[in-house]
């Protein structure tokens, strides 16, 4: 039985990082080449034969890198300068390799909104990030009132 081997998250993360480096290196913003250097260093530090790979499982490395990439490429991460072009291109690459990542965020967010109650600190920050994203739009939607009510009724202890 000949099946194509499914690529691991680790391999997909490496692909994303490899494709992001030239995008950031070619971006016009002054700090973008420095960020490209940082991505290159990260790629070398977690790549095949690296010391990190000798000490940690690929799944652990992928989980950490996914968190980093998810935060970097989150839709609310806007700069209103040349970096936004690199971020948009980077999101396309990330979305191609990890289409489920942002879909999970949206599904979790919708579940909280439908329930009408925030149950945990993670859900609080999920909704808070969504508020930040919506507030950045030229015409914020009516949904913001509901989201404000959700975060106001939740208390972080």
Image (cartoon, rainbow, N blue to C red):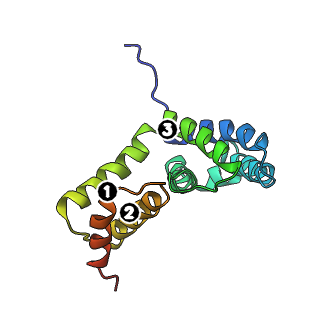
Alpha carbon distance from label 3 to label 1:
18 Å
Quadrant of the snapshot with the N terminus: top left
Query: Horizontally, is 125 left or right of 94 in the view?
Result: left
Callout 3 secondary element: helix
Q: Earlier in the sequence, mark 3 or mark 1?
A: 3
Residue at the far bottom in the pictured view:
157
**Who's the residue at 30% across and 55% down the image?**
108
Q: Earlier in the sequence, mark 1 or mark 2?
A: 1
Q: Earlier in the sequence, mark 3 or mark 2?
A: 3
Task: State if disc 2 and disc 1 touch (CB < 8 Å).
Answer: yes
Q: Which residue is mark 1?
A: 109
Query: Horizontally, is 129 left or right of 27 in the view?
Result: left
Quadrant of the snapshot with the C terminus: bottom left
Q: Is residue 68 above or below residue 21?
A: below
User: Which disc is residue 72 wearing?
Assistant: none
The one nearer the camera, 19 or 131, is 131
> Residue 152 is drawn in which quadrant?
bottom left
**Crowd band around label 1 with a 10 angstrom C-alpha radius: few (<14), some (14–19), many (20+):** some
Task: State if disc 2 and disc 3 touch (CB < 8 Å).
Answer: no
Residue 31, given in percent of the width and then of the height, sits at 78, 55
Q: Which residue is mark 3?
A: 95
Callout 2 secondary element: helix
How many labels, in total?
3
Alpha carbon distance from label 3 to label 2:
19 Å
**Crowd band around label 3 with a 10 angstrom C-alpha radius: few (<14), some (14–19), many (20+):** some
**Who's the residue at 63% across and 50% down the image?**
53
Q: Nearer the viewer, mark 3 or mark 1?
A: 1
**Crowd band around label 2 with a 10 angstrom C-alpha radius: few (<14), some (14–19), many (20+):** some
Residue 89, given in percent of the width and then of the height, sits at 61, 38
Q: Which residue is mark 2?
A: 126
């Amino acid at each position: 039985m000949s099946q194509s081997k499914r690529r691991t998250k680790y391999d997909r993360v490496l692909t994303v990082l490899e494709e992001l480096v030239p995008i950031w290196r070619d971006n016009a913003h002054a700090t973008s080449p420095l960020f490209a250097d940082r991505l290159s260093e990260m790629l070398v530090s977690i790549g095949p034969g690296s010391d990190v790979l000798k000490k940690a499982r690929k799944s652990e490395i992928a989980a950490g890198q996914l968190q980093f990439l998810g935060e970097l490429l989150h839709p609310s991460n806007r700069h209103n300068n040349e970096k936004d072009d690199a971020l948009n291109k980077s999101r396309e690459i990330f979305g191609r390799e990890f289409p489920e990542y942002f879909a999970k965020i949206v599904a979790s967010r919708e579940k909280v909104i439908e329930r009408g109650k925030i149950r945990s600190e993670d859900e609080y920050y999920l909704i808070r990030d969504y508020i930040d994203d919506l507030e950045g739009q030229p015409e914020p939607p009516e949904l913001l009132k509901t989201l404000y009510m959700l975060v106001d009724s939740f208390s972080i202890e």
